[in-house]
Image (cartoon, grey):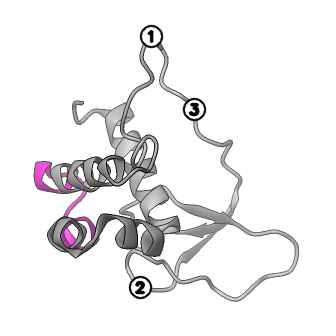
Amino acid sequence: MGDGTQARRVYENAVEYLCRNVDAVRELIGPALWEAPFAVVRDGDPSTGAWRDAVRALHNAAEAAGIPGGLGLSITMGSSVWPSGPTPRSVGWVCPSGRCARVDLREGAVPETPECALAGRPMRLVDG
């Protein structure tokens, strides 16, 4: 997979999945396959090959651990179109580091600011 816009989005979505399920994925993968790549995903620059390689390593480990589709980097065979993500909404919380495409949508009353499971910092409110 290249590093174009579609590929970047697929990696961001994979990290979003990781962010939402960090504890479960860490437990299934185990420390030997988790520690080094997770540190790169958490602290590295998403525009680098090393960051994408670390996401791919976590994806492969997740697949090997029995998570169907791993973190979601695999392309559905026979599909000529990339699967689309959910329709974005204009108000919500986004990853403070910009490492993933995670968005927690705000419904009704303003809840407490959620914390990003990946970065360990408060998520950033986007109010459009």
Q: Which residue is mark 1?
A: 78
Q: CA distance from mark 3 to mark 2?
A: 28 Å
Q: Secondary structure at mark 3?
A: loop
Q: CA distance from mark 1 to mark 3?
A: 16 Å
Q: Nearer the viewer, mark 1 or mark 3?
A: 1
Instruction: Find residue 120 and name its label.
Output: 2
Q: Give whichever of 86, 56 is nearer the camera.
A: 56
Q: What residue lies at 23% left-to-right and 36% top-to-bottom?
A: 3
Q: Is residue 41 magenta?
A: yes
Count the marks.
Answer: 3
**Would you identify the image quadrant in which residue 75 lies?**
top left
The image shows residue 70 at horizontal and vertical percentages of: 39, 47
Q: Secondary structure at mark 2?
A: loop
Q: What residue lies at 68% left-to-right and 42% top-to-bottom?
A: 87
Span of residues in magenta: 39-51
Left or right: residue 94 compared with residue 51: right
The image shows residue 115 at horizontal and vertical percentages of: 53, 83
> Are the residues at dot 1 and dot 2 in contact (C-beta closer than 8 Å)?
no
Instruction: Find residue 84 and name its label.
Output: 3
Amino acid type indicated by mark 1:
Gly
Amino acid type indicated by mark 3:
Ser
Precedes in sequence: disc 3 or disc 2: 3
Look at the picture and state if 88 lies above or below 111. Answer: above
Amino acid type indicated by mark 2:
Gly
